[in-house]
Image (cartoon, helix red, strand yellow):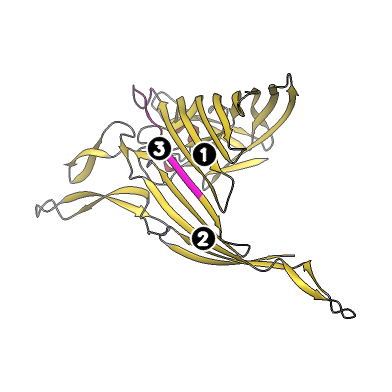
Amino acid sequence: MMWYLTRVWQKLFSHESGVYFQDEVDITSWLRVNAGIRVSMYQFTGPFTRYYKGITGHTDSTKTYKKGEIIKSYFGFEPRISARFLLKDKSSIKAGFTYNNQYIHLASLSAVSLPTDIWYPSTDKARPQKGWQASLGYFRNFNNNKWETSVEVYYKKMENIIEFKQGALPSDNVNDNTDNLLVYGTGWSYGAEFFIKRTFGKLTGWIGYTLAKSDRYFPDIQDTKYPAKYDRRHDLTLVGTYELNKRWTFGFSFIYASGNTLTLPNSWYFNNQDLLFNYGPRNSTRMAPYHRLDLSATWYDKPTKTRIDKKTGEKTEVAKKFRQNVAFSIYNVYNRANPYFLYIDNDGSITSNDFKISVKQVSLFPILPSITWNFEF
């Protein structure tokens, strides 16, 4: 059972269950197929009060459901298949297709960058999200598997995704249901992923880069497609580990990602001394990119101890039952002020002719050194 707090005074209840069958078969020496199907069931249950809107937009009737009463049931059939084709030159081609039902929605207030997203369950009005994804990749190892590389492309389409209506906020739903504030649309995500990994020598690590695009279309919000809030055109990760000896290991990781999108006003005006804004196209502004560097060093104690035979005086090395290591790390080494959210601020007074509008940024997690003492026994 799951419950979701959508307001301080309202809880939503549901049950979700599923069963799946899956099998992997080597059809030939070069073709392996993994296929399966998942069947899921979701039930939206009481206690719950449904508020019905009249022509004027105000609540004119309600219906109350008892505890445990099934309000709406959904069934989902989710087939999936993947195949691996071995090639002669130590490489392979992998392809896959999957169809999924998702009963929990992420509702975003995309018009602002504040962290106000909520997870909202499917109801009798908010239908489950459905989506399918296809992928195709080429994988190849070099130099006796010392280097691993891959290139993979994917395409995903989603239906019944949700957003809040223009100007709607979750706090607006007094004597109302949150799903009355939602609109429904379609989404697309597609891109290419590149990967290379070094598995030999003292220095090991990998580099991963994704070039992607994620769009949304909500006819009740905008008559054209627009970037999703979490659309990231570029996503780069570098991870490395250097083993100096059996006692010391050093590591680093670097992350770079395009900033999230948001909608900022392109003009402002006063009406009866109230400050009002005109907004541009949905998610037409992108935050500054996110990037940071982390460093670490780990000291390990000696894995064995010397045991001396009391009779012969012979020395032997035996494995320790109790081990320890100390990890030193620095998060965000160059103290990058990565944007967490943006907000509009104003200074001055219109009467004194020094009124100004500015966009300010809130950031979290500056440079953070840490020491960790670990034990194994």
Q: Is mark 3 on a helix, strand or loop?
A: strand
Badge 1 amino acid: Ile
Badge 3 amino acid: His
Q: Relative to residue 323, is residue 11 drawn left or right? A: left
Q: Which of 345 and 57 is in front in this view?
A: 345
Residue 320 included in the magenta stretch of the image: no
The mark found on residue 196 in the picture is 1
Q: What element carries label 1?
A: strand
Which residue occupies 47% across, 30% down? Answer: 192
Q: Mark 2 points at which residue?
A: 296
Q: Which of 282 and 260 is in front in this view?
A: 260
**Label 2 neighbour load within 10 Å: few <14, some 14-19, many 20+:** some
Q: Name the residue under label 3.
A: 234
348 w.r.t. 54: above or below: below
Q: Which stretch is magenta?
A: 219-239
Q: Main secondary structure of the magenta part?
A: loop
Q: Is mark 2 on a helix, strand or loop?
A: strand
Residue 228 included in the magenta stretch of the image: yes
Which residue occupies 51% across, 37% down? Answer: 195
Q: Nearer the viewer, residue 308 or 124?
A: 308
Regarding residue 166, the answer to whether it shows in the image is yes
Badge 2 amino acid: Ser
Residue 287 image-quadrant placement: top left
Quarter containing the N terminus: top right
